[in-house]
Amino acid sequence: MSNKSLDIIHDEHRALAAMLSGLRGLVASIEAGRLKPDFELMASMIEYIEMVPEKVHHPKEDSYLFARLRERSAEALPIIERLEAEHREGDARMATLRAALEAYRREGESGLAGFQGALKTYIEHEWQHMNTEEHLIFPLARKHLSAEDWAHIDAAFLANDNPWQGPAGKYAALFTRIVNTAPAPVGLGGG
Ligand SMILES: [Fe+2]
Ligand SMILES: [Fe+2]
């Protein structure tokens, strides 16, 4: 059964996964010598990951979906608490990733492995987090939330400014810049 809020969360997860695998692919091409590092591009991809999922997506999960589900399902409670703790650690994890990119920019080629390692850690964490939401939280939400709960959650999700656009199209502009600069298959730019 289709569900507006869960569909939105799922779509946002796919968009984040696409940005993360784009960045990972870019770094793999640099390592293989097919591309020269474009630090501005990598920094803007990290900025996008920070602005959209970290600042918009996770707060929306906490405030609406998790807030209702924690009142309805004792089984969901420990999972929600773990996911919320992971949301709170988001800033620190982003800072680690940004610092690794800065070290790479400063040190040149010898910094690549460090950045690649930090990116791998970040991506694995995000995958595990999104899988927990989709495989454990979604079914519990479908089972335990009432029609009235969903009306409340859907209203909040749909009333939001499209988070992937952001205020005044800020994130859309950032996304367009990334897509136009990044080489295929990340974007439309030349490799
Ligand atoms: Fe989350
Ligand atoms: Fe999520």
Image: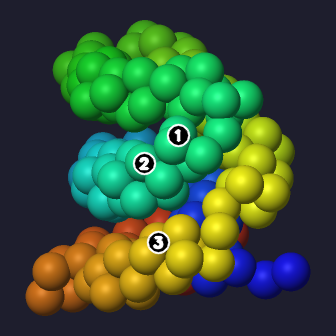
* Nearer to us in this view, 154 or 186: 154
Q: Give the image location of residue 183, x and y in percent.
A: 55, 68
| Residue 140 numbered mark, or none | none
Q: Quadrant of the C terminus?
A: bottom right
Answer with mark 2 or mark 3, whichever residue precedes in sequence: 2
Residue under pointer 1: 70
Which amino acid is tagged 1?
Arg
The residue indicated by pointer 3 is 153
The image's colour scheme reads rainbow
Quadrant in the rendering for residue 166: bottom left
Q: Residue at x 53, y 69 (%)?
A: 149
Q: Which residue is mark 2?
A: 67
Q: Secondary structure at mark 1?
A: helix
Tell me if residue 119 can be seen: no
Q: Amino acid at mark 2?
A: Ala
Horizontal placement of 81 versus 93: left or right?
right
Residue behind label 3 places its C-beta within 8 angstroms of ligand 2: no
Marks 2 and 3: CB-CB under 8 Å?
no
Could you say where residue 92 lies in the image, as x and y percent from the top left? 28, 21
Mark 3, Cα crowd under 10 Å, few <14 / some 14-19 / many 20+, is many
Q: Residue at x 32, y 87 (%)?
A: 159
Q: Which residue is found at the position 40% from the left and 15% from the top? A: 111
181 and 98: which is toward the camera: 98
Please give left or right for residue 1 compared with residue 186 in the image: right
The quarter of the picture where the N terminus appears is bottom right
Place of residue 129 in the rendered image (x, y in percent of width and height, measured from the top left): 62, 35
Q: Is residue 136 left or right of residue 50?
A: right
- Whether 53 is drawn above or below 114: the answer is below
Tell me if mark 2 has few (under 14), some (14-19) or many (20+) residues whose alpha carbon lies within 10 angstroms of its own.
some
Q: Separation of disc 3 and disc 1 at Cα?
A: 13 Å
Asked whether mark 1 lies closer than 8 Å to ligand 1, one says no
